[in-house]
Amino acid sequence: MRFPIIKDIATTSVVSVDVESSISEAIETMLENDHRSIIVVDGYSFKIFSILDLLKVQKNKIDLSLPLSKLDLVEVSKVCLNQNVLETLDHLSDSLEFVCVVNKDKSLYGVVTHTDITSNIDPETLMENYRLVDFLKLNRKFKWVNKDDITEELLDSMSENMFDNVVVVEELKPVGILTTKDIISLVKHKKDLKQPISEYMISPVDTMPKNATIKEALEFIKTKHYKRVVVVDGEGRLSGIITQKELVSLTYSKWVTLMQEHQEELNELNKLLENKNKEYEMMASTDSLTGLYNRYKFSELYLSSYTSMAQRDNNLSLIILDIDHFKNVNDTYGHNNGDQVLIQVSHTLLRTVRNIDIICRWGGEEFVVLVPTADINTAFSIAEKLRKKIEELEIDIVGKITTSFGVSQVRIGDKMEDAIGRADNALYLAKNSGRNCVRTELDL
């Protein structure tokens, strides 16, 4: 099993236009070839005309007869055709999925995309025990809208926030999708953008359950020729979106495992693999939005802290906190501002706790703090200090927020779920006591 060389997986039949071609010609080329973006050749420099550029053209009412050279297009990264596929992963981002492959004389050989990498991953080698629900946190860059939203306002929002895909929901269930191809067609044919998005969305939406495996998701993408997977919960409500790039990243660890069985390759790639392992180990142990530990890493740290407590006859306590009325924050100010609240709370927790304390984003608006060497009274004092610090925050747009806390003390024989359960019951009591307060298991 060898990591592929770029020239072996690159697409050589590249759809491109010259930099002096008109915007209208570029749009027509995209439609004819069913492409969401195309290469713009400017000598030995290569740029991309993408759906986001098209949205900017639409928003700013730019004359479609103007040449592409008049637009501020993004230059595409270049890799040599003899490089290893691993060396392209850092070039592939959600907003720029092409990497140009060049010959030794710097002329264009082809392009490598997420699809090319995905197509060269053997589904039988993938991590069958990992499920989409474990990785939904990776993706933040997607947008969902209601079917009655006005198309023109939506396109403006997509342009400003650099979203290139939209899921249309009704009661949080996906009922339609607006693809990049649809957006190109809307602009090209000068459709009435005052109409609600329901007039132009594609329906129904192909979705996958959040308990599907990574292997199933990759096979789904390869079969359907999609760029992303729309993920729903057991009741059909939108849970999130996972892109091709994220699925490729998740399979990387499995590739490394296979490579360790082939000593000949390790000599060539050892240094590269070492750097990549560190990168993906960090990705696997932290929450992508807040940078705090995730549940998986917290479980490991709980076990080591519990062992230390038992061996040294120390105390160990646990704090769980929840942002009050967080759903109202999202509903009133939008999910982007909701994310800022989560980030600000995370930073406040990190600044306030002791160096030995361990903080985790437990899920949604919930956080857990493991407090070594602290009995329940000490943990209560720490929680009260955290509550006051968060209450003092002044968050842009949102303003003031409050949090509720539950505290438990870890006992000999406790599993993590036991300590979490008692703290969660105390948190529930804090919520019923008017919120913005701390309760412990002793209050139950």
Image (spheres, rainbow, N blue to C red):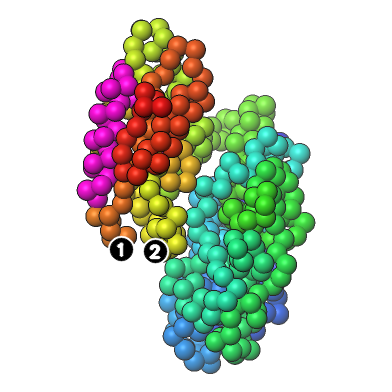
47 with respect to 397 (left or right): right
Question: Measured from the top left, where is residue 247 in percent x and y?
Answer: 62, 48
25, 219: nearer the viewer: 219
53, 201: nearer the viewer: 201
Q: Which mark is residue 263?
A: none
Question: Measured from the top left, where is residue 244 in percent x and y?
Answer: 62, 54
Q: Which mark is residue 333?
A: 2
User: Marks 2 and 1: CB-CB under 8 Å?
Assistant: yes
- Identify the image quadrant of the C terminus: top left
61 with respect to 220 (left or right): left
Q: Residue at x 39, y 42 (%)?
A: 431
Q: Quadrant of residue 268?
A: top right
Q: Residue at x 51, y 76 (%)?
A: 154
Q: Is residue 356 visible?
A: no
Q: Does residue 222 sit above or below 180 in this rendering?
A: above
Q: Magenta residues, as a range? A: 367-393
Magenta span contains residue 397: no
Which amino acid is tagged 2? Tyr
356 with respect to 155 (left or right): left
Question: Measured from the top left, where is residue 367 in percent x and y?
Answer: 41, 38
Magenta span contains residue 370: yes
Task: Identify the element where label 2 is drawn.
Answer: helix
163, 360: nearer the viewer: 360
Q: Which mark is residue 397?
A: 1
Which amino acid is tagged 1? Ile
Q: Does residue 369 sit above or below 188 in this rendering?
A: above
400, 436: nearer the viewer: 436
Task: Identify the element where label 1 is drawn.
Answer: loop
Q: CA distance from mark 2 to mark 1?
A: 8 Å
Q: Quadrant of residue 192?
A: bottom right
